[in-house]
Image: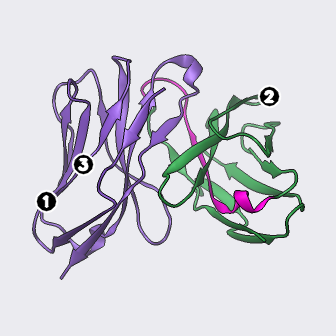
Amino acid sequence: NAGVTQTPKFQVLKTGQSMTLQCAQDMNHEYMSWYRQDPGMGLRLIHYSVGAGITDQGEVPNGYNVSRSTTEDFPLRLLSAAPSQTSVYFCASRETGRTNEKLFFGSGTQLSVL
Amino acid sequence: AQTVTQSQPEMSVQEAETVTLSCTYDTSESDYYLFWYKQPPSRQMILVIRQEAYKQQNATENRFSVNFQKAAKSFSLKISDSQLGDAAMYFCAYRSLIYNQGGKLIFGQGTELSVKP
C-alpha cells in the first residue's frame, strides 16, 4: 500500500516559471489537501478538496491552482513561481467523516525558487 | 480565527528522562480535535497522539501522553523514558469540526526536541 505519493521530492525553479507538484493516494480518500511548511511558521493550508470536482481555498491560496478530476489525484500548480514560494510542500489525505481523523501525509516536496 | 502557539522553539532532554512540550490554542468553539505530530529529519509527518475536546480523559499512546486543560486551552505533550529516536520537530495542531472550515489543521510553530545520550 503506497499511501500518499508526492513527486518530485526536490525542484529548483527560476522566477516566473510554472510547474505542477503531483500528489496521488491509493486509499480511496475523499479528502485531500496541500500544505506548505516554512521555518518558524508550522504548516499552512493552501487548498483542499472534499471529493472529485470539488476544491476550495485554504489560508494561503494566492499563486496556486488546484483541480480534482479523480479521487486519486490532486495536483498543485504554481502559475508563475516567485521566491516567496520557496518552501516544503506536503500533500495529505484522509477519509471524510468525524471519526476519520488521521491525516496521511506524503513525504514532501522541497521547492526552491531563484 | 483559531490560533495555536508553541512557545518553546527548542527543548532538550537526557535519554531515559521525561520532557514536556507546551502548546496553547485559542478558539471559541466547544468541539474540536487536537493533535501532536512528529517530524524527524526524514521530513515525514507522523501522528503521535490525538485528543477529542469532548473527552475529559487525557489521551495516552505508550510513552506519550497529553495534559489537556480545556478551560485553560492548553494541550501539552509528555514524553516519558525519552529515546534517541524521539529527537525531532514536534508540532501541535488544532482541527475545527465546523463544516465550512474545510477540515484544515492549524499548526503551531513547532518545538525542536533534542535527546542527549
- Examine the structure image and report whether residue A112 is included in the region drawn in magenta: no
What distance separates the C-alpha of mark 2 from that of mark 1? Answer: 45 Å
Residue labelled with disc 1: B80
The letter of the green chain is: A
Q: Is residue B43 above or below residue B105?
A: below
- On the image, the x and y values in percent for residue A43 come to 53, 49
Residue labelled with disc 2: A53
Sequence-first tag of 3 and 1: 3
Element at label 3: loop
- Which callout, 2 or 1, points to the residue nearer the camera? 1
Snapshot colouring: by chain
Element at label 1: loop
Instruction: Give the residue drawn at x 23%, y 24%.
Output: B55
Which is nearer the eye, A6 or A26? A6
| Residue type at tag 2 | Gly
Give me the chain letter of mark 3. Answer: B
Q: Few, some or many C-alpha atoms within 10 Å of disc 1 (few <14, some 14-19, many ≥20)?
A: some
The letter of the purple chain is: B
Give me the chain letter of mark 2. Answer: A
What's drawn in magenta, residue-wise?
A82-99
